[in-house]
Amino acid sequence: MAGWENGNNDEGIWRAVPQASYTGATGTNPVSGRNGTPSYMTLAAPDKSDFSTVILNDSEYERTYKLQTVNMAYTGTPSLEIWETRAAGKGEAFNSSYMQYRGKVSADGGVIYTVRVKPYSIVTVTTLENSGNNAHHTPLPVEGERTVLDTDATGSVQNTGDGILYADDFDFPARRFL
């Protein structure tokens, strides 16, 4: 569950875990993570029953992350679901690689999870069991064609073939604005 916690602090809203989050991205606007440094954020249930770590790889190289959980309320080392989002390949629908279930990862030797993140992708590893939920496998809705903002020289008629992108004299005597 995500959102704002109430005054009693009992809504079960997940918390960011600063000790298990980091970014080496630089810049302010836009932020650039293409310097090859790690970038990840961990969220956990307030009762420590579940967690998710979102890992961003905005570089051209595959990155390997090793996760070790401590101070969680579950016993043992449950396998983690892996979900990936990346750009569609050539000839694929734009949303073909959006939030795709990629399997599970188990802890190596019972303690460390090793996660490989492809270039230019986002991976979420989580204790949540969502792979069996059909809602998580439903593609995003696709909009129809969008009208291009392109007018004729008068600015009144759409025209994509006249070499004028947009025209407007900003004189609206017949229009009433509130």
Image: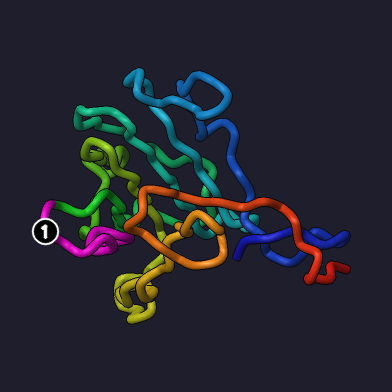
Residue at point 28%, 28% (across, down): 59
Is residue 48 positioned above or below 176 on the image?
above
Residue located at (50% from left, 28% from top): 31
Q: Disc 1 marks which residue? A: 91
Picture colour scheme: rainbow
Q: Does the magenta run of residues contain 19?
A: no
Is residue 109 among the parts visible in the rendering?
Answer: no
Left or right of residue 85: residue 173: right
49 on left or right of 97: right
Q: Which quadrant of the figure contains the N terminus?
A: bottom right
Which percent across, then down, holds residue 166? 51, 51
Q: Position of residue 44 (x, y in %)?
A: 56, 51
Relative to 23, does residue 49 appear above or below in the rendering? below
Query: Which quadrant is the C terminus positioned in?
Result: bottom right
Q: Quadrant of residue 147?
A: bottom left
Question: Most extreme residue toward the left, as rendered?
Answer: 91
**Which is nearer the eye, 170 or 18?**
170
| Nearer the observer, 122 or 28 | 28
Residue 143 at x, y = what percent?
A: 39, 74
Q: Amino acid at mark 1?
A: Gly
Residue drawn at x 21%, y 58% is: 102
For label 1, count other residues whose C-alpha is less than 10 Å away and answer few (under 14), some (14-19) or many (20+): few
Residue 101 appears at what percent x and percent y? 26, 63
Magenta range? 90-100
Q: Secondary structure at mark 1?
A: loop
